[in-house]
Amino acid sequence: MPEFFSDYPNSIAHIDRGRVQSIFEHSAGVEELARMFGAKAGVENLCGLIASCHDLGKYSEQFKHRILTETKTIPVQPGYDGSEIVDHSTAGAQFINQVVG
């Protein structure tokens, strides 16, 4: 997992019962599991890369706003109905596609 992600200011992956899990912490755990499963097929590096990138979209301001609003960490704006859709799941795939081509 690239270390430069660890201190990114918008790095909230989950908030559960007041506990904030950073994207770095979440993705590092997912990467570890993916490498373990991938090792059985000899593709641990590929699995690790994919796992590291799986939530890159959570670094967006839109995702940060959504998670903070849904957990009532910030006040809900008038007119917000909780149905905001933020595409955080395809950013990693798009990034890998750009790099690998």
Image: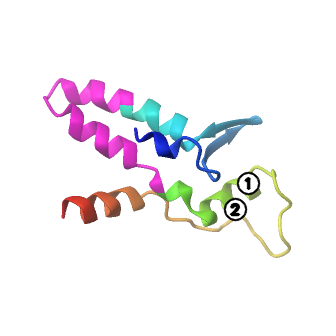
Mark 2 neighbour class, 10 Å CA radius: few under 14, some 14 to 19, many 20 or more: some
Name the residue carrying label 1.
68
Which mark is on residue 45? none
Task: Tell me if 19 is positioned left or right of 2 in this view.
Answer: right
- Is the C-beta separation of discs 2 and 1 under 8 Å? yes
Residue 46 sits in quarter: top left
Task: Tell me if 76 is positioned left or right of 61 in this view.
Answer: right
The x, y position of residue 19, in whole percent, is: 72, 33
The x, y position of residue 14, in whole percent, is: 63, 43
Q: Image point 38% across, 43% down: which residue?
A: 52
Q: Which residues are magenta?
A: 32-56
Marks 2/1: CA–CA distance: 5 Å
Q: Secondary structure at mark 2?
A: helix
* Between 99 and 58, the one nearer to me in the picture: 99
Name the residue carrying label 2.
65
Q: Image point 26% across, 27% down: which residue?
A: 37
In the depicted structure, whether residue 101 falls above or below residue 43: below
How is this picture coloured? rainbow
Q: Amino acid at mark 1?
A: Leu
The x, y position of residue 78, in whole percent, is: 86, 74
Residue 15 sits in quarter: top right
Q: Image point 62% across, 66% down: which residue?
A: 62
The verdict on residue 73 being magenta is no
